[in-house]
Image (tube, grey):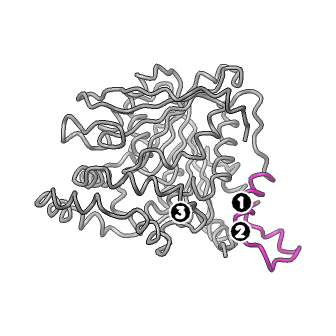
Amino acid sequence: MTTIQAESISAFEEGFAFGADGTRLYVQSQSAPASHAPNKSSTCQAILCDGLLCDGYIWKYLWPAILPHRRVSHWHYRGHGRSGLPVDPQAIHIPDHARDLNHVRSYLQGHNVVLFGHSMGCQVALEAYRMQPENVRAMVLLCGTYGKVTETFRGSALLSQVLPRIIERVVAVPHLARALWSRIPPEMVFRLALLTGEIDKSVRREDLLPYLSHMTHVDLPIFLRMLQAAGEHTAEDVLASVTCPVLVVAGERDSFTPPFLAETMASLLPQAEYFLVAGGTHIAPLEQHDLVNARIEAFLQEHHLLWAGAHRPSRERIDGIALAHWDCSGLDAGDSHDCPFPMLWLHLCDPPHRSGFVPQQHQRKQVSRRCWLRQ
């Protein structure tokens, strides 16, 4: 990644945009000096869209990787972090968040934008594109899908079936539910996530605990209703009309939004590139941040969205970063031809996806079969 001196980076700029109903939306931005981005694409800024219950933890490593190339902005959803509760209590659906995003875009007075979305942020970015496609230069969609997320959680529709009953019970005793929710120990949740394999053991405790602490401060009834709304929403019908390039990143072991959903989304987007993080879970941008950041940098460089002096990561560099995450002991020289990462490069890092190409089933099996699980 390109590096710049810490003292040359501007301090955070903080402020508030306002949604259509008057809800206060917290926005923070940061810029590198213009001298580090001498071409005209420097006016294109990145806007980061979180997942549900999140207030920016997932961008810990991506933010400083993007910053040398352009202005970076991040905002909090209504009812999250430093944003206010919805002025209209019913305005908690994906289109409401998308309208908020477009209000944030106006507040930032940026012309060209690259929209980044993680988890539910993928739906928000796609819906915002539907409403206001002008000046969206590209999208990067990480560990998410276009909709109906509660129907595929852990490969089952069970969540969508039980969620209405859970909401009914919580609404019946809201004070008790909030009290119990706010007292969930983050450390306990972290250990449970490790034990169940929901997150990879490589993730740093200090990277995830801020999220686990923040989630208990989000109003429980609002969270559950937002989750239900995300499960009912779909942007599938807008995918074919997206004309900007899109990088779709999936985690091989993501049980929240299984990778086949991301692959399907990539196949329906006219100019999509699909990147599978072998062994990655729903928080792959934290677990394998060097690899994910390098792939994003390559994507941005390919589409002329980095400053002129930036160099696109080579095939060997991305393969090398990927290999560092895997145990390749016991392989001899003859196995090098079967190493998964050249296949991953062809399939993921420089794919013919821009014409709607979907890898054949035997190719997907080969990638899956040849990826060595971490010891």
Q: Quadrant of residue 321?
A: bottom right
User: Chief secondary structure of the magenta span?
Assistant: helix
- Residue placed furthest toward the right: 333
SS at mark 2? loop
Amino acid found under the numbered disc labelled 1: Ala
Observer-nearest residue: 115 or 345?
Answer: 115
User: Does residue 334 belong to the magenta stretch?
Assistant: yes
- Residue carrying label 1: 322
Q: Is residue 162 above or below residue 145?
A: below
Q: Quadrant of residue 148?
A: bottom left
158 vs 209, left or right, is left
Whether pointer 1 and pointer 2 mark residues with C-beta atoms closer than 8 Å, the reply is yes
Q: Residue at the spot x=70%, y=28% of the render? A: 307
Residue 163 pos. (x, y %) = 24, 63
SS at mark 1? helix
Pointer 3 local density, CA inside 10 Å: few below 14, some 14–19, many at least 20: many
- Assign the C terminus to one quadrant of the image: bottom right
- Assign the N terminus to one quadrant of the image: top right
- Residue carrying label 3: 281
Amino acid found under the numbered disc labelled 3: Thr
Residue 89 pos. (x, y %) = 18, 41
- Residue carrying label 2: 326
Range of residues picked out in magenta = 316-341
Q: Earlier in the sequence, mark 3 or mark 1?
A: 3
